[in-house]
Image (cartoon, grey):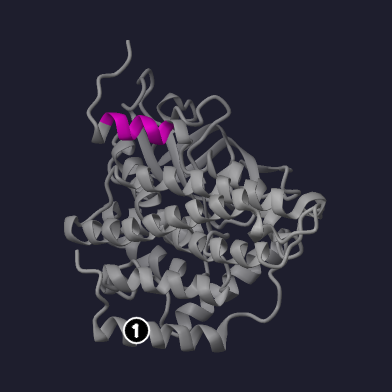
Amino acid sequence: MDLVFTEADQDFRARARAWLKDNIPTERRPAHGEASAQFDRDWQKKLYEHGWAGVNWPKEYGGLGLSAVQQVIWYEECARAGAPNYINTTYVALMHAGPTIIACGTDEQKAFHLPRILSGENLWCQGFSEPNAGSDLASLKTTGVVDGDYLVVNGSKTWTTDGQHADFQELLIRTEPGSQRHKGLTWVICDMRTPGITVSPIRTMLGDEHVNTTFYDDVKIPLTNVVGELGSGWKTAMSTLSFERGTGFIGDQLALFERVNQAIALAGRTRLADGGLAIEDAGIASRLAMIKADTMAIRAMTFAQISEIEQSGGPGPKGSIMKLMVTGTSKALSHLVAEILGWEFMEFNGDREDHPWTYEYLWSWVYTIAGGTSEIQREIIADQLLELPRAR
């Protein structure tokens, strides 16, 4: 692909940079609770009202319909400006549910949900993983039994990110009794206010209650909420996960480049135990150079990846390569910063703003699990890209 920016691309970058400079919130995002969700709703509403919502959505569904290159430019400028991190309580709605409904939903589902997602009115969570079906999603056991015009759902889900704040959930359940593995699953829109749903927060090592276990006790969901077809949920779920692994982490890929530059600046002003600047230490300087080279490669691959998505019409398994690379590079960077900061790095009160590098270190471990573990990403690469034989 041509990596030379056109005049239109440069004009778009200038407009995006100017708008972000004048409009990013001056107040800090609350670290926890409903206040953090309201902060995210307000930011998404502001993007929507000023015409910046849905950079990766088609125009006919209310998005910007940006070119592949301009999508990357937008995320780069957000990272440069320090705009609110896009991986927040609006993430599942914008990067999972919305694209899945666009690809597989009915006209009625699109008309109701898409505008409310873009405007920040409705937040979503994901109901895929279960206590004994995390990375092995096909072994899920939460059931949905057809009863007239409804599915009656019983079971539980875990790692339900921001479930306590969500209005709706993308829920994957087993609707064919006796079915095994990928067969007999259904992807359904679940209203989180439906009677019978209990959300129980889980406190993590980051000091927050970002994830939850969700219980379903005779929860009645209308059959009109099925996305795709009854029993074809695996196909719909793979659409959801392909968006997450293909385009869902693009913002984080590009934000990583900015974090590397920040780490280099940190090394230039931080002194080690021997009194010398960290950047003057040959080992640290060499590792920083390698990490920056990796992030530059990731940036180039991001442009190539999103260009392929634009041409093919949807993301594919190559997104697993990108996620694996970003995960590994993020961990390497946070480990190195921990060495640079020393004991200061150990201070953490659960607030990302107060201790950003410690937060990033802890998040780098989460990142190896969220959106599919690193082991699962390697399996996808081996199976779908390299076509290696499966171990017996």
Q: Is residue 120 magenta?
A: no
Which residue occupies the extreme top position in the image?
392
Q: Is residue 379 magenta?
A: yes
Check disc 1: other Cα within 10 Å, few if <14, some if 14-19, many if 20+. Answer: some
Task: Name which quarter of the figure residue 111 lies in.
Answer: bottom left
Lateral position of residue 264 relative to residue 148, left or right? right
Image location (x, y in percent) of residue 279: 64, 60
Image location (x, y in percent) of residue 143: 46, 29
Lateral position of residue 370 relative to residue 338, left or right? left
Image location (x, y in percent) of residue 265: 63, 68
Q: Which one is in front, 128 or 381? A: 381
Residue drawn at (33%, 41%), measured in percent from left and top? 238
Q: Is residue 158 above or below residue 310?
A: above
State the residue position of label 1: 12
Q: Main secondary structure of the magenta part?
A: helix
Q: How many marks?
A: 1
Q: Is residue 133 above or below residue 252?
A: above
Q: Which one is in front, 5 or 17? A: 5
Q: Which one is in front, 127 or 341? A: 341
Kind of residue at badge 1? Phe
Q: Which one is in front, 104 or 295? A: 295
Q: Which residues are magenta?
A: 376-383
Q: Quadrant of the C terminus?
A: top left
Task: Name which quarter of the figure residue 14 lies in.
Answer: bottom left
